[in-house]
Amino acid sequence: MSVQATTTSSTAATALPILTALSLSHCLNDLLQSLLPAIYPNLKQDLSLSFAEIGLITLVFQVTASLLQPAVGAITDKRPQPFSLAVGMGCSLLGLLLLSRAHAYGIVLIAAAIIGIGSSIFHPESSRVARAASGGRFGFAQSFFQVGGNTGQAIGPLLAALIVAPNGQGAVAWFVIVPLVGIALLTWVGRWYAEHLGPRRKAAANPAPLTRNQWWAIAILLVLVFSKNFYMASLQSFYTFYLIERFGLTIQSSQIYLFVFMFAVAAGTFFGGPLGDRFGRVIVIWISIVGVLPFSLALPFVGFGWTVALTAIIGFVMASSFPAILVYAQELAPGRVGMIAGLFFGFAFGTGGLGAALLGVLADHTSLDFVYRVCSILPAIGVLMAFMPKSERHAI
Protein backbone atom coordinates (compact mmCIF):
# COMPACT_ATOMS: atom_id res chain seq x y z
CA MET A 1 0.00 0.00 0.00
CA SER A 2 2.74 2.46 0.92
CA VAL A 3 4.78 1.58 -2.17
CA GLN A 4 1.76 2.21 -4.41
CA ALA A 5 1.05 5.53 -2.70
CA THR A 6 4.67 6.55 -3.10
CA THR A 7 4.60 5.68 -6.81
CA THR A 8 1.38 7.59 -7.34
CA SER A 9 2.72 10.58 -5.47
CA SER A 10 5.93 10.50 -7.50
CA THR A 11 4.05 10.36 -10.78
CA ALA A 12 1.79 13.26 -9.77
CA ALA A 13 4.80 15.31 -8.67
CA THR A 14 6.68 14.62 -11.91
CA ALA A 15 3.86 15.25 -14.41
CA LEU A 16 3.39 18.99 -13.88
CA PRO A 17 7.09 19.87 -14.25
CA ILE A 18 7.17 17.85 -17.47
CA LEU A 19 4.03 19.56 -18.78
CA THR A 20 5.53 22.93 -17.83
CA ALA A 21 8.78 22.12 -19.66
CA LEU A 22 6.82 20.96 -22.72
CA SER A 23 4.65 24.06 -22.70
CA LEU A 24 7.67 26.35 -22.35
CA SER A 25 9.46 24.48 -25.14
CA HIS A 26 6.36 24.81 -27.30
CA CYS A 27 6.39 28.53 -26.51
CA LEU A 28 10.02 28.80 -27.65
CA ASN A 29 9.41 26.69 -30.76
CA ASP A 30 6.40 28.69 -31.91
CA LEU A 31 8.03 32.00 -30.96
CA LEU A 32 10.67 31.19 -33.57
CA GLN A 33 8.01 30.26 -36.09
CA SER A 34 6.03 33.44 -35.44
CA LEU A 35 9.05 35.58 -36.26
CA LEU A 36 8.56 34.61 -39.89
CA PRO A 37 5.12 36.20 -40.46
CA ALA A 38 5.99 39.00 -38.03
CA ILE A 39 8.78 40.22 -40.34
CA TYR A 40 6.67 39.95 -43.50
CA PRO A 41 6.32 43.76 -43.72
CA ASN A 42 10.13 44.06 -43.59
CA LEU A 43 10.60 41.34 -46.21
CA LYS A 44 7.90 42.83 -48.45
CA GLN A 45 9.61 46.21 -48.34
CA ASP A 46 13.22 44.99 -48.63
CA LEU A 47 12.62 42.38 -51.35
CA SER A 48 9.68 44.11 -53.11
CA LEU A 49 7.40 41.11 -52.64
CA SER A 50 3.77 40.80 -53.71
CA PHE A 51 1.04 39.49 -51.43
CA ALA A 52 1.10 36.24 -53.42
CA GLU A 53 4.83 35.85 -52.69
CA ILE A 54 4.19 36.56 -49.01
CA GLY A 55 1.50 33.88 -49.03
CA LEU A 56 3.90 31.44 -50.72
CA ILE A 57 6.38 31.85 -47.83
CA THR A 58 3.64 30.79 -45.42
CA LEU A 59 2.66 27.93 -47.73
CA VAL A 60 6.25 26.59 -47.91
CA PHE A 61 6.64 26.78 -44.13
CA GLN A 62 3.31 25.22 -43.30
CA VAL A 63 3.42 22.52 -45.97
CA THR A 64 6.82 21.30 -44.76
CA ALA A 65 5.49 21.57 -41.22
CA SER A 66 2.47 19.44 -42.15
CA LEU A 67 3.56 16.74 -44.59
CA LEU A 68 5.92 14.91 -42.25
CA GLN A 69 3.82 15.11 -39.10
CA PRO A 70 1.43 12.17 -39.69
CA ALA A 71 4.38 9.97 -40.74
CA VAL A 72 6.42 11.00 -37.70
CA GLY A 73 3.41 10.32 -35.46
CA ALA A 74 2.73 6.90 -36.99
CA ILE A 75 6.38 5.88 -36.61
CA THR A 76 6.57 6.98 -33.00
CA ASP A 77 3.29 5.21 -32.18
CA LYS A 78 5.21 1.98 -32.82
CA ARG A 79 8.58 3.10 -31.49
CA PRO A 80 8.68 6.35 -29.46
CA GLN A 81 11.71 8.58 -30.02
CA PRO A 82 12.08 10.75 -26.88
CA PHE A 83 15.13 12.68 -28.08
CA SER A 84 13.61 13.61 -31.44
CA LEU A 85 12.14 16.64 -29.65
CA ALA A 86 15.58 18.22 -29.28
CA VAL A 87 16.40 17.35 -32.91
CA GLY A 88 13.31 19.23 -34.08
CA MET A 89 14.35 22.30 -32.10
CA GLY A 90 17.80 22.05 -33.68
CA CYS A 91 16.22 22.30 -37.14
CA SER A 92 14.39 25.44 -36.05
CA LEU A 93 17.72 26.89 -34.88
CA LEU A 94 19.26 26.25 -38.31
CA GLY A 95 16.30 27.81 -40.12
CA LEU A 96 16.40 30.86 -37.85
CA LEU A 97 20.06 31.55 -38.60
CA LEU A 98 19.47 31.15 -42.34
CA LEU A 99 16.45 33.49 -42.20
CA SER A 100 18.53 36.21 -40.52
CA ARG A 101 20.94 36.18 -43.50
CA ALA A 102 18.43 35.57 -46.30
CA HIS A 103 18.63 38.48 -48.75
CA ALA A 104 17.12 36.64 -51.70
CA TYR A 105 13.57 35.36 -51.96
CA GLY A 106 14.68 31.78 -52.65
CA ILE A 107 16.79 31.70 -49.47
CA VAL A 108 13.80 32.95 -47.47
CA LEU A 109 11.78 30.02 -48.82
CA ILE A 110 14.53 27.53 -47.87
CA ALA A 111 14.73 29.00 -44.35
CA ALA A 112 10.95 28.77 -44.02
CA ALA A 113 11.08 25.11 -45.12
CA ILE A 114 13.78 24.20 -42.56
CA ILE A 115 11.81 25.85 -39.74
CA GLY A 116 8.77 23.90 -40.92
CA ILE A 117 10.67 20.59 -40.81
CA GLY A 118 11.67 21.33 -37.22
CA SER A 119 8.01 21.85 -36.38
CA SER A 120 6.97 18.60 -38.06
CA ILE A 121 9.41 16.67 -35.87
CA PHE A 122 8.52 18.53 -32.66
CA HIS A 123 4.73 18.43 -32.51
CA PRO A 124 3.62 14.76 -32.75
CA GLU A 125 6.02 13.38 -30.15
CA SER A 126 5.63 16.32 -27.77
CA SER A 127 1.84 15.88 -27.91
CA ARG A 128 2.34 12.23 -26.97
CA VAL A 129 4.58 13.13 -24.03
CA ALA A 130 1.98 15.66 -22.85
CA ARG A 131 -0.65 12.92 -22.86
CA ALA A 132 1.70 10.59 -20.96
CA ALA A 133 2.19 13.30 -18.31
CA SER A 134 -1.50 14.20 -18.11
CA GLY A 135 -2.54 11.93 -15.24
CA GLY A 136 -5.77 11.30 -17.14
CA ARG A 137 -6.65 15.00 -17.59
CA PHE A 138 -6.14 14.80 -21.34
CA GLY A 139 -7.90 18.05 -22.28
CA PHE A 140 -6.04 20.01 -19.62
CA ALA A 141 -2.69 18.52 -20.70
CA GLN A 142 -3.25 19.35 -24.37
CA SER A 143 -4.38 22.88 -23.56
CA PHE A 144 -1.44 23.41 -21.20
CA PHE A 145 0.93 22.14 -23.91
CA GLN A 146 -0.70 24.08 -26.74
CA VAL A 147 -1.04 27.35 -24.85
CA GLY A 148 2.74 27.47 -24.74
CA GLY A 149 2.78 27.47 -28.53
CA ASN A 150 0.10 30.12 -28.77
CA THR A 151 1.93 32.28 -26.22
CA GLY A 152 5.07 32.00 -28.32
CA GLN A 153 3.10 32.99 -31.40
CA ALA A 154 1.80 36.02 -29.50
CA ILE A 155 5.20 37.08 -28.16
CA GLY A 156 6.94 36.73 -31.52
CA PRO A 157 5.25 39.71 -33.23
CA LEU A 158 5.79 41.87 -30.13
CA LEU A 159 9.51 41.06 -30.06
CA ALA A 160 9.68 41.60 -33.80
CA ALA A 161 8.17 45.06 -33.33
CA LEU A 162 10.64 45.92 -30.56
CA ILE A 163 13.79 44.30 -31.96
CA VAL A 164 13.57 43.32 -35.63
CA ALA A 165 11.58 46.26 -37.02
CA PRO A 166 14.02 48.98 -35.83
CA ASN A 167 17.20 46.91 -36.38
CA GLY A 168 16.45 45.04 -39.58
CA GLN A 169 16.26 41.41 -40.66
CA GLY A 170 19.72 40.59 -39.30
CA ALA A 171 18.38 41.10 -35.76
CA VAL A 172 16.52 37.79 -36.16
CA ALA A 173 19.85 36.13 -35.27
CA TRP A 174 19.65 37.72 -31.80
CA PHE A 175 17.00 35.11 -30.97
CA VAL A 176 19.50 32.23 -31.20
CA ILE A 177 19.32 31.82 -27.41
CA VAL A 178 15.67 30.75 -27.77
CA PRO A 179 16.27 27.39 -29.53
CA LEU A 180 19.35 26.72 -27.40
CA VAL A 181 17.22 26.93 -24.24
CA GLY A 182 14.61 24.79 -25.96
CA ILE A 183 17.14 22.09 -26.83
CA ALA A 184 18.28 21.94 -23.18
CA LEU A 185 14.70 21.64 -21.90
CA LEU A 186 13.72 19.00 -24.43
CA THR A 187 16.80 16.92 -23.70
CA TRP A 188 15.67 16.80 -20.06
CA VAL A 189 12.12 15.95 -21.10
CA GLY A 190 13.47 13.23 -23.40
CA ARG A 191 15.35 11.63 -20.51
CA TRP A 192 12.18 11.62 -18.37
CA TYR A 193 10.13 10.12 -21.18
CA ALA A 194 12.72 7.42 -21.91
CA GLU A 195 12.65 6.39 -18.23
CA HIS A 196 8.85 6.67 -18.09
CA LEU A 197 8.47 4.33 -21.07
CA GLY A 198 10.64 1.61 -19.48
CA PRO A 199 9.65 -1.78 -20.87
CA ARG A 200 6.86 -0.16 -22.92
CA ARG A 201 9.48 1.28 -25.25
CA LYS A 202 9.17 -1.92 -27.27
CA ALA A 203 7.14 -1.73 -30.45
CA ALA A 204 3.45 -1.30 -29.64
CA ALA A 205 0.90 -3.87 -30.68
CA ASN A 206 -1.10 -3.00 -33.77
CA PRO A 207 -4.35 -1.29 -32.71
CA ALA A 208 -7.69 -2.46 -34.05
CA PRO A 209 -8.68 -1.09 -37.47
CA LEU A 210 -10.88 1.99 -37.40
CA THR A 211 -14.53 1.58 -38.34
CA ARG A 212 -16.25 3.52 -41.08
CA ASN A 213 -18.02 5.71 -38.51
CA GLN A 214 -14.71 6.48 -36.80
CA TRP A 215 -13.13 7.54 -40.09
CA TRP A 216 -16.20 9.65 -40.94
CA ALA A 217 -16.06 11.38 -37.54
CA ILE A 218 -12.33 12.09 -37.95
CA ALA A 219 -12.99 13.47 -41.45
CA ILE A 220 -15.61 15.88 -40.06
CA LEU A 221 -13.16 17.05 -37.39
CA LEU A 222 -10.51 17.63 -40.08
CA VAL A 223 -12.94 19.78 -42.08
CA LEU A 224 -13.57 21.85 -38.95
CA VAL A 225 -9.81 22.26 -38.54
CA PHE A 226 -9.72 23.41 -42.18
CA SER A 227 -12.35 26.11 -41.61
CA LYS A 228 -10.63 27.29 -38.42
CA ASN A 229 -7.11 27.46 -39.82
CA PHE A 230 -8.05 28.86 -43.22
CA TYR A 231 -9.77 31.73 -41.43
CA MET A 232 -6.97 32.14 -38.90
CA ALA A 233 -4.46 32.32 -41.77
CA SER A 234 -6.17 35.47 -43.00
CA LEU A 235 -5.47 37.11 -39.65
CA GLN A 236 -2.02 35.70 -38.91
CA SER A 237 -0.59 36.52 -42.35
CA PHE A 238 -2.44 39.67 -43.40
CA TYR A 239 -3.81 41.36 -40.27
CA THR A 240 -0.82 43.74 -40.03
CA PHE A 241 -1.24 44.77 -43.68
CA TYR A 242 -4.98 45.23 -43.14
CA LEU A 243 -4.37 47.58 -40.22
CA ILE A 244 -1.70 49.50 -42.14
CA GLU A 245 -3.80 49.90 -45.30
CA ARG A 246 -7.21 50.56 -43.76
CA PHE A 247 -6.33 52.51 -40.62
CA GLY A 248 -2.89 53.97 -41.45
CA LEU A 249 -0.95 52.25 -38.66
CA THR A 250 2.84 51.97 -38.70
CA ILE A 251 4.55 48.57 -39.02
CA GLN A 252 5.47 48.58 -35.33
CA SER A 253 1.96 49.52 -34.20
CA SER A 254 0.37 46.87 -36.41
CA GLN A 255 2.65 44.20 -34.93
CA ILE A 256 1.58 45.19 -31.43
CA TYR A 257 -2.07 44.64 -32.39
CA LEU A 258 -1.11 41.31 -33.95
CA PHE A 259 0.27 40.47 -30.50
CA VAL A 260 -3.12 41.36 -28.98
CA PHE A 261 -4.84 38.96 -31.37
CA MET A 262 -2.30 36.18 -30.77
CA PHE A 263 -2.56 36.65 -27.00
CA ALA A 264 -6.32 36.13 -27.28
CA VAL A 265 -5.64 32.96 -29.27
CA ALA A 266 -3.34 31.73 -26.49
CA ALA A 267 -6.00 32.43 -23.85
CA GLY A 268 -8.65 30.56 -25.84
CA THR A 269 -6.37 27.57 -26.26
CA PHE A 270 -5.70 27.46 -22.51
CA PHE A 271 -9.38 27.30 -21.62
CA GLY A 272 -10.53 25.02 -24.46
CA GLY A 273 -9.13 21.76 -23.10
CA PRO A 274 -10.31 22.06 -19.46
CA LEU A 275 -13.76 23.17 -20.64
CA GLY A 276 -13.89 20.06 -22.83
CA ASP A 277 -12.92 17.90 -19.83
CA ARG A 278 -15.72 19.46 -17.78
CA PHE A 279 -18.61 19.99 -20.21
CA GLY A 280 -17.82 17.64 -23.08
CA ARG A 281 -15.74 18.17 -26.20
CA VAL A 282 -18.67 18.28 -28.63
CA ILE A 283 -20.22 21.27 -26.85
CA VAL A 284 -16.92 23.16 -26.87
CA ILE A 285 -16.39 22.42 -30.57
CA TRP A 286 -19.89 23.63 -31.48
CA ILE A 287 -19.52 26.90 -29.60
CA SER A 288 -15.94 27.63 -30.65
CA ILE A 289 -16.49 27.16 -34.40
CA VAL A 290 -20.06 28.33 -35.07
CA GLY A 291 -20.04 30.79 -32.18
CA VAL A 292 -17.62 33.17 -33.89
CA LEU A 293 -19.84 33.58 -36.99
CA PRO A 294 -21.60 36.80 -35.84
CA PHE A 295 -18.24 38.39 -35.04
CA SER A 296 -16.53 37.31 -38.27
CA LEU A 297 -19.45 38.61 -40.35
CA ALA A 298 -19.25 42.01 -38.62
CA LEU A 299 -15.46 42.37 -38.78
CA PRO A 300 -15.07 43.79 -42.33
CA PHE A 301 -17.54 46.60 -41.65
CA VAL A 302 -16.41 48.11 -38.33
CA GLY A 303 -13.95 50.81 -37.30
CA PHE A 304 -10.52 50.46 -35.74
CA GLY A 305 -11.56 49.96 -32.10
CA TRP A 306 -14.15 47.32 -32.95
CA THR A 307 -11.69 45.63 -35.33
CA VAL A 308 -9.23 45.11 -32.48
CA ALA A 309 -12.01 43.94 -30.14
CA LEU A 310 -13.64 41.57 -32.62
CA THR A 311 -10.37 39.97 -33.72
CA ALA A 312 -9.55 39.33 -30.06
CA ILE A 313 -12.96 37.71 -29.50
CA ILE A 314 -12.63 35.64 -32.67
CA GLY A 315 -9.14 34.51 -31.71
CA PHE A 316 -10.21 33.52 -28.18
CA VAL A 317 -13.36 31.63 -29.12
CA MET A 318 -12.03 29.91 -32.24
CA ALA A 319 -8.76 28.82 -30.61
CA SER A 320 -10.62 27.01 -27.84
CA SER A 321 -11.70 24.37 -30.36
CA PHE A 322 -8.36 22.78 -31.21
CA PRO A 323 -7.52 21.08 -27.88
CA ALA A 324 -11.06 19.68 -27.75
CA ILE A 325 -10.89 18.51 -31.38
CA LEU A 326 -7.48 16.87 -30.91
CA VAL A 327 -8.36 14.96 -27.73
CA TYR A 328 -11.75 13.97 -29.22
CA ALA A 329 -9.96 12.55 -32.28
CA GLN A 330 -7.39 10.71 -30.12
CA GLU A 331 -10.21 9.07 -28.17
CA LEU A 332 -11.85 8.05 -31.46
CA ALA A 333 -8.63 6.26 -32.51
CA PRO A 334 -7.18 4.38 -29.50
CA GLY A 335 -3.53 3.41 -29.82
CA ARG A 336 -2.84 6.08 -32.44
CA VAL A 337 -2.00 9.10 -30.28
CA GLY A 338 1.04 10.13 -32.33
CA MET A 339 -0.58 9.55 -35.72
CA ILE A 340 -3.67 11.57 -34.77
CA ALA A 341 -1.55 14.37 -33.28
CA GLY A 342 0.60 14.45 -36.41
CA LEU A 343 -2.42 14.30 -38.71
CA PHE A 344 -4.28 17.14 -36.98
CA PHE A 345 -1.26 19.37 -36.31
CA GLY A 346 -0.07 18.71 -39.86
CA PHE A 347 -3.48 19.37 -41.38
CA ALA A 348 -3.75 22.56 -39.34
CA PHE A 349 -0.40 23.80 -40.65
CA GLY A 350 -1.11 22.68 -44.20
CA THR A 351 -4.53 24.27 -44.52
CA GLY A 352 -3.23 27.43 -42.88
CA GLY A 353 -0.42 27.59 -45.44
CA LEU A 354 -2.75 26.88 -48.34
CA GLY A 355 -5.11 29.54 -47.04
CA ALA A 356 -2.33 32.12 -46.80
CA ALA A 357 -1.18 31.40 -50.36
CA LEU A 358 -4.66 31.50 -51.91
CA LEU A 359 -5.73 34.54 -49.92
CA GLY A 360 -2.52 36.31 -50.92
CA VAL A 361 -3.37 35.79 -54.59
CA LEU A 362 -6.93 36.96 -53.94
CA ALA A 363 -5.64 40.07 -52.13
CA ASP A 364 -3.36 40.95 -55.07
CA HIS A 365 -6.29 40.78 -57.48
CA THR A 366 -8.90 42.42 -55.24
CA SER A 367 -8.23 43.91 -51.80
CA LEU A 368 -7.73 42.85 -48.20
CA ASP A 369 -11.22 44.17 -47.43
CA PHE A 370 -12.61 41.69 -49.94
CA VAL A 371 -10.50 38.88 -48.47
CA TYR A 372 -11.98 39.40 -45.01
CA ARG A 373 -15.51 39.54 -46.40
CA VAL A 374 -14.98 36.19 -48.13
CA CYS A 375 -13.42 34.62 -45.03
CA SER A 376 -16.19 35.85 -42.75
CA ILE A 377 -18.50 32.97 -43.75
CA LEU A 378 -15.97 30.18 -43.09
CA PRO A 379 -17.08 29.52 -39.48
CA ALA A 380 -20.46 28.44 -40.86
CA ILE A 381 -18.76 25.17 -41.88
CA GLY A 382 -19.02 24.25 -38.20
CA VAL A 383 -22.61 23.09 -38.78
CA LEU A 384 -21.05 19.86 -40.08
CA MET A 385 -20.92 18.76 -36.44
CA ALA A 386 -24.61 17.94 -36.91
CA PHE A 387 -23.53 15.11 -39.26
CA MET A 388 -21.26 13.46 -36.70
CA PRO A 389 -22.23 9.75 -36.50
CA LYS A 390 -24.45 9.20 -33.46
CA SER A 391 -22.21 6.44 -32.17
CA GLU A 392 -19.26 8.87 -32.13
CA ARG A 393 -21.12 12.02 -31.07
CA HIS A 394 -21.02 11.41 -27.33
CA ALA A 395 -18.99 13.98 -25.39
CA ILE A 396 -15.87 12.03 -24.49
Image: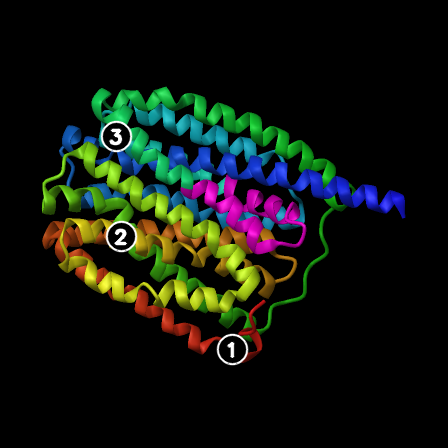
- Dot 2 crowding, Cα within 10 Å, few <14, some 14–19, many 20+: many
Q: Of discs 1 and 3, which sits in the foreground?
A: 3
Where residue 364 sits in the image (x, y, percent)?
A: 12, 49
Can residue 88 be seen here? The reply is yes
Q: Image point 31% across, 55% down: which residue?
A: 313
Of helix, strand and loop, which mostly describes the magenta segment? helix
Q: Is 136 on the left or on the right of 52, as rendered? A: right
Q: Which of marks 3 and 2 is nearer the N terminus?
A: 3
Give the crowd class for mark 3: few <14, some 14-19, many >=20 residues within 10 Å. many
Q: Mark 1 points at which residue?
A: 389
Q: What residue type is labelled 3?
A: Ala
Seen at 63% across and 67% down, the residue is: 209
**Residue under pointer 3:** 161
The residues colored magenta run 122-150
Front residue (pair 117, 14): 14
Above or below residue 180? Residue 76 is below
Name the disc covering residue 311, or none.
2
Residue projecting furthest to the right = 1
Q: How many labels does the image show?
A: 3
Q: What residue type is labelled 2?
A: Thr
Disc 1 to disc 3: CB gap under 8 Å? no
Could you give the CA–CA distance between mark 1 and mark 2, rounded to whole angstroms?
33 Å
Residue occupying the point 51% across, 35% down? 24
